[in-house]
Image: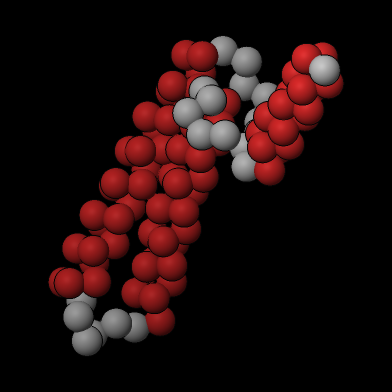
């Protein structure tokens, strides 16, 4: 997944916000589950699902920022580019 955030500072901010969202949502969800153990109503389940969605959103922020900052490769696209470079180098050397 790649979003067109051009500035390095913007991507670092996205990474930090994603980490904050992920940690805060997971901690709040854990506290919520422990404090309401066995006494959950439908409203509690909806709120827990919202916290889970916030944690997933934070993880997506981290993933997008990591790809934009080139901390992670983009999977198959990075591998195919690398193998193409190898073929080009082999053809030039022959």
Q: Return the residue nearer the eye: 35 or 56.
A: 56
The residue positioned 66% from the left and 34% from the top of the image is 78
Residue 35 locus on image (x, y percent)? 16, 71
Corner quadrant of residue 3: top right
Q: Quadrant of the C terminus?
A: top right
Q: 29 above or below 24? A: below
Q: Return the residue nearer the eye: 43 or 28.
A: 28
Q: 68 above or below 39? A: above
Q: Is residue 81 visible?
A: no
- In the picture, measured across the screen, residue 68 lies left or right of residue 87, that is left
Q: Is residue 12 visible?
A: yes
The residue positioned 43% from the left and 23% from the top of the image is 13
Residue 39 locus on image (x, y percent)? 23, 85
Give the colour scheme shown.
secondary structure
Residue 88 locus on image (x, y percent)? 80, 21
The image shows a total of numbered marks equal to 0
**Most distant residue in the front direction:** 94
**Most distant residue in the left direction:** 35
The residue positioned 40% from the left and 81% from the top of the image is 42
Corner quadrant of residue 84: top right
Q: Quadrant of the N terminus?
A: top right
The residue positioned 37% from the left and 68% from the top of the image is 48
Q: 54 above or below 50? A: above
**Most distant residue in the bottom direction:** 38
Residue 66 locus on image (x, y percent)? 49, 31
């Amino acid at each position: 997944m790649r979003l067109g955030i051009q500035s390095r500072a913007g991507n670092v901010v996205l990474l930090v916000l994603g980490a904050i969202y992920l940690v805060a949502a997971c901690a709040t969800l854990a506290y919520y589950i422990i404090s309401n153990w066995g006494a959950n109503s439908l409203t509690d389940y909806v709120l827990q699902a919202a916290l889970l969605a916030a944690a997933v959103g934070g993880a997506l922020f981290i993933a997008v920022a990591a790809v934009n900052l080139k901390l992670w490769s983009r999977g198959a696209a990075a591998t195919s580019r690398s193998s193409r470079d190898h073929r080009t180098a082999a053809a030039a050397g022959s």
